[in-house]
Image (tube, helix red, strand yellow):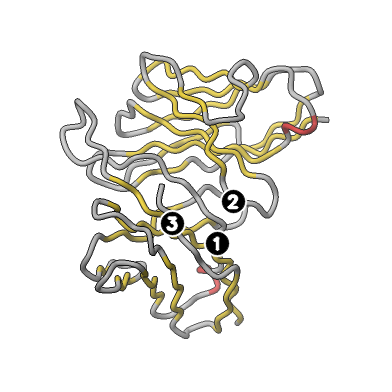
Amino acid sequence: GAVVSQHPSRVICKSGTSVKIECRSLDFQATTMFWYRQFPKKSLMLMATSNEGSKATYEQGVEKDKFLINHASLTLSTLTVTSAHPEDSSFYICSAPEVNTEAFFGQGTRLTVV
Amino acid sequence: DAKTTQPNSMESNEEEPVHLPCNHSTISGTDYIHWYRQLPSQGPEYVIHGLTSNVNNRMASLAIAEDRKSSTLILHRATLRDAAVYYCILRDVVCLWSCGGTSYGKLTFGQGTILTVHP
């Protein structure tokens, strides 16, 4: 089946630095990708919808200047957490829906900001 | 998005069937019922989906009430690997301008049901 690959799976960064997370659809084209954030023992919360060739759509309360999304091609979307702080530590997950079938999820990126 | 209600947690013994309920009393006529599950420290994975009729696949069965206001995910023989959080989600069909078929919109996750499977 279709696969979505997310990289890195784990990252530890210092407070104030930026971190880029990549999400790739490996065998299908994704004009849309979704980015989620999940805190421990909580459900997934949709952060933004990434659109190939246009600006991302952010959910209410999500700072677009802090969470930069770039959907540069039909197989790649990136999420950059800028000026990361400890409260940004979380599990970030991307998803890509495919036509006529279900949505596929990346394996997630565990971000720890120290 | 129409809301779903699931029990916070359920327990089962290995090799026994598990019935995971979901209430969605405000479901609209175009909402599909989707089930995903999330194993610890992994992204969610698709389990099954349906509209009106009951559905079976290699992972599970989905029983949908006649009025569509509730559904039940059935795992016929639970294994330890089935221990996960199970999410029942309603999704509308969104056929994009160039989709070439049926495309579903974003997934909005509720709290889900934590399934514990005992050996």
Residue A93, picture quadrant:
top right
Residue A19, picture quadrant:
top right
Residue picked out by circle 2: A43
> Percent x, y for residue B91?
34, 49
Left/right of residue A68 with respect to residue B74 in the rendered view: right
> Percent x, y for residue B8?
60, 68
Residue picked out by circle 3: B36
| Rendered position, B44 above or below A14 | below
Residue furthest to the front in view is B26
* Crowding at mark 3 (Cα within 10 Å: few <14, some 14-19, many 20+): many
Foreground residue among A7 and A96: A96
Residue picked out by circle 1: B85
Chain under numbered label 3? B
Foreground residue among B81 and B57: B57
Q: Residue at x 55, y 84 (%)?
A: B13
* Mark-to-mark CA distance, 1 and 2: 9 Å
Does label 1 or label 3 sit earlier along the sequence?
3
Answer whether labels 1 and 2 touch (C-beta < 8 Å): yes
Give SS at disc 3. Answer: strand
What amino acid type is highlighted by mark number 2? Ser
Q: Residue at x 36, y 57 (%)?
A: B34
* Mark-to-mark CA distance, 2 and 3: 12 Å
Chain under numbered label 1? B
What amino acid type is highlighted by mark number 1? Val
> Percent x, y for residue B102?
20, 41
**Mark 1 or mark 2, whichever is nearer to me:** 2
Foreground residue among A89 and B50: B50
